[in-house]
Image (cartoon, rainbow, N blue to C red):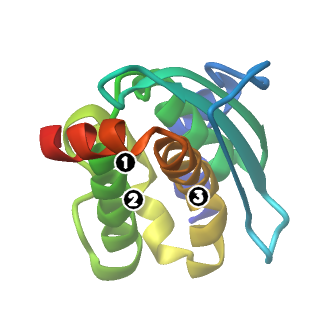
């Protein structure tokens, strides 16, 4: 059963972590730690004028499952919006906890982690990169001027 969890696909995703490192001047930074295992993700972002992720960097120290989720995220995150990240997070949680199918669209690759649903102790480590990215984007959005935030909220 453990072989299913750590499939070749998961291990390949874990080994390829796009946008690894930190940004020199992020507009938002998010950090999440899975208390049970210590998996940790720190994410930096900048946003473009439309509130989409323009630059992204991640420093992830996690198990293979957390690294795999970060790998998928890193492949797909440039150009993403806050509502897309919220939808991906919610779909991931539904997939892990309630038998949902997982994210669609830009973050559909996270479905590769569907088998983690059978291992509740691994859920938090699988979510650290997604949650840290959402936190970073929300922080960056909060730093925009009120006029910009209003305009961006209307565009979503």
**125 on left or right of 77:** right
Which label number is shown at residue 126? 3
**Rendered location of residue 7, percent (x, y):** 55, 43
Q: Are marks 2 and 3 in contact (CB under 8 Å)?
A: no
**109 on left or right of 10:** left
The first of marks 2 and 3 along the sequence is: 2
Residue 108 figure quarter: top left
**CA separation in Å, label 1 and label 2:** 6 Å
Look at the numbered disc 3 and give the secondary structure of its residue. helix
Residue at the spot x=43%, y=29% of the render? 77
Vertically, is 19 above or below 123? above
Vertically, is 143 above or below 45? below
Residue 135 figure quarter: bottom right
**Rendered location of residue 24, percent (x, y):** 79, 18
Residue 7, can we see it? no
Q: Give the residue at mark 1.
A: 85
Vertically, is 53 above or below 128? above
**CA separation in Å, label 2 and label 3:** 11 Å
Look at the numbered disc 1 and give the secondary structure of its residue. helix
Q: Residues within 10 Å of mark 2 (few under 14, many from 20)?
A: many
Q: Give the residue at mark 2.
A: 89
Residue 21, can we see it? yes
Residue at the spot x=17%, y=43% of the render? 156
């Amino acid at each position: 059963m453990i072989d299913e969890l750590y499939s070749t696909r998961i291990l390949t995703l874990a080994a390829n972590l796009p946008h690894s490192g930190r940004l020199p001047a992020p507009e938002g930074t998010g950090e999440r730690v899975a208390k049970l295992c210590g998996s940790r993700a720190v994410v930096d972002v900048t946003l473009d004028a439309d509130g989409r992720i323009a630059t992204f960097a991640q420093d992830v120290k996690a198990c293979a499952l957390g690294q795999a989720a970060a790998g998928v995220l890193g492949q797909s995150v440039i150009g993403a919006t806050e509502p897309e990240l919220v939808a991906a997070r919610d779909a991931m949680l539904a997939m892990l906890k309630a038998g949902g199918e997982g994210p669609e669209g830009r973050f559909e690759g996270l479905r590769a982690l569907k088998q983690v649903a059978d291992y509740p102790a691994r859920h938090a480590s699988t979510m650290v990169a997604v949650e840290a990215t959402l936190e970073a984007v929300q922080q960056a959005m909060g730093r925009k001027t009120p006029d910009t935030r209003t305009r961006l909220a209307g565009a979503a």
